[in-house]
Amino acid sequence: MRIFILVRHGESLLNVAGIVNADPARDPGLSERGEEQARDLGRQIAAVELDLVVTSRFPRAQETARLALAGRHVQSLVDAALDDVQIGELEGLTIDDYRAWKRDRSRSEPFPGGETLDAAAARFAGAFSARLTQPERAVLIVCHEIPVRYALNAALGSESLDAPLHDVRNATPYVFDEQGLAAAIEGMTRLASPPTG
């Protein structure tokens, strides 16, 4: 049986500050609490023999993986397709600014200078699909809240990528088998490509 453990990174310094960030070069990494969350993640998955760890390009994701796997030799891969949603001109603004801009807008409207949520969902689905084509049997994927949320909701068969689960806890492992990840990919792909009228 193949397993895929999806994890949102540990609490970041930008989480603490309430700042949105989609540029890996502007990510200052984990808070002290986030570092401890990453170590706790390591304790939770210590009994799983991992073949591969995949992260986004963001320091907060890479630090989470490094701390969680301290002392273990696991092949690693960085996949830019797992990067957070490209928010363009909203970079560096507050989470409240981000939510205010997003309110009453559709998933198909791009962030100013960025991408649409539908495009991001399709990108995440592609990243997860790539994992299914590889031979590794146990894969840890450390990325961001939105791709994990979308995968969980799509795997449940929800008609919304944002529900029923919305808030994804930091450094918490969510385990998918091969069939579950395939269902997540199918659902994300379908919901990211709504029918046109």
Image (spheres, rainbow, N blue to C red):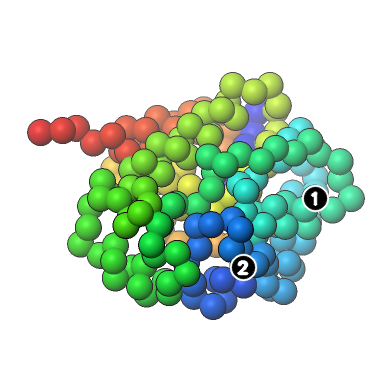
Give the residue pinned by disc 2.
Answer: 12
Q: Is residue 156 left or right of residue 19?
A: left
Q: CA distance from mark 2 to mark 1?
A: 18 Å
Q: Position of residue 124 (x, y in %)?
A: 47, 40
- The answer to whether one can see residue 75 in this image is yes
Q: Residue furthest bottom?
A: 17
Question: Between tags 2 and 1, which lies in front?
Answer: 2
Residue at the (64%, 23%) spot, across then down: 134
Reply above or below: 99 against 77. Answer: below
Q: Earlier in the sequence, mark 2 or mark 1?
A: 2
Callout 2 secondary element: loop
In the image, residue 96 sits, relative to residue 190, either above or below, namely below
State the image quarter where residue 155 is shown. Answer: top left
Residue 186 appears left or right of 159:
right
Name the mark on residue 69.
1
* 123 relative to 16 in the view: left or right: left
Q: Residue at x 74, y 68 (%)?
A: 36
Query: Percent from the top left, x then y, of residue 47?
Result: 80, 45
* Residue lying furthest left: 197
Label at residue 165: none
Name the kind of residue labelled 2 in the image: Ser
Q: Amino acid at mark 1?
A: Leu
Tell me the residue at 20%/62% (across/down).
104
Give the residue furthest to the right.
71
